[in-house]
Amino acid sequence: MTHPRNVLLGAQAAAKVLPVCDHYSGVEVRMRKSLQLQDELHQEFGVGVMDVTLDCEDGAPVGGERGHAELVADLANGASSQARVAVRVHPVDHPAFEQDIAILVGQAHSRWCHIMLPKVESVADIARAQQAIDAAGGAHLPLHALIESPLAVHNAFGIAAHPRVASLSFGLMDFVSAHGGAIPASAMGVAGQFSHPLVVRAKLAIASACHAHGKTPSHCVVTEFNDAHALQTAAQRACQELGFTRMWSIHPSQVRPVLAAFAPAADAVEQAADILQAAIEADWAPIQHGGQLHDRASYRFFWSVLERAHATGQVLPAHALGYFQP
């Protein structure tokens, strides 16, 4: 049987489905706990439901960038073999960028699932970073870009089109700050970031750019990490209204709410599995299911439901499990 991804997605089938939660930490004790949490959740769900991104940009003390990069490389090299560990380096125009790449890629190039590039403004920034990363032995590494300014939003489609870029993330607080007070501070909160027109426009542009090029749009952080309801609301709106398929977390308590918000409902998973099974039996010709006509256009949607269910550790119907065997 030809795999549904190859039948339905064509060239985009080569794009890897990423875990829906990208968890950030930059202080040593929290980085260690994040890697431990990742292992625990992998054992619980039977699949990697989160990435852990170790942070050199905001995690490194000023003047201590080298030591922090060496610590991060050691943590990555010491992580379990099943761990998905990424690293956020300094921006390409920061004095520590070249040093970051030399240490992090040079010493741990086989351990990273991707490199996060902050403050990306243009395709030229991606090209500059790629050159340094490839020269250090990281030609195999996917690149993620953090969109944090009006110019970056303007260039989002070009950045997403770059063949090494796998995902775009939105940097909410830097984006608001980049407007020099023209956007109020309230737009950095849960309510404001879903109501201020410029912020919503930026999010939609990033999501649209990613979907246009088969990349993963990743939603920004929720800083009110003690407010579980606010996080759940934000995650649901990011997923259901704005088209994001991944989201950052900055506190362990945020991971499970993100997984829950991005997970499809059990009845939706069952429906998707049934429709795809019927499609396979019909050799992907149109079918009738529950009084509705379905063809490859809707099959693609239902396949995405199953992929998201798997990425969030949901229980899949028995007849759909074979789609996700190694």
Image (cartoon, grey):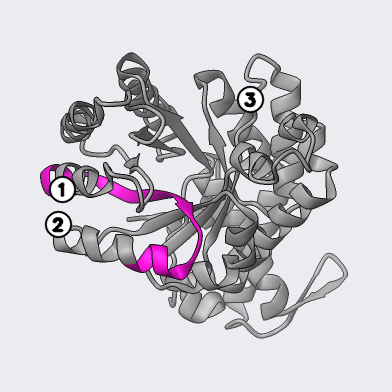
Q: Is residue 264 shown left or right of residue 253? A: right
Q: Nearer the viewer, residue 10 or 170?
A: 170
Q: Nearer the viewer, residue 98 or 23?
A: 98
Quarter of the N terminus within the rendering: bottom left
Residue for badge 2: 136
Q: Is residue 323 magenta?
A: no
Q: Nearer the viewer, residue 40 or 205?
A: 205
Which residues, given as a range, are shown in magenta?
A: 106-127
Residue for badge 1: 102
In primary-sequence order, the first of circles 1 and 2 is: 1
What secondary structure is marked by label 3? Answer: loop
Q: Residue furthest front?
A: 180
Q: Are marks 1 and 3 in contact (CB under 8 Å)?
A: no
What's the distance in space between the residues labelled 3 and 2, CA to CA? 35 Å
Q: Inspect the image, locate mark 1, and give the three-letter code of the amino acid beneath it.
A: Ala
Q: Is residue 152 shown left or right of residue 323? A: right
In primary-sequence order, the first of circles 3 and 2 is: 2
Q: Quadrant of residue 72?
A: top left
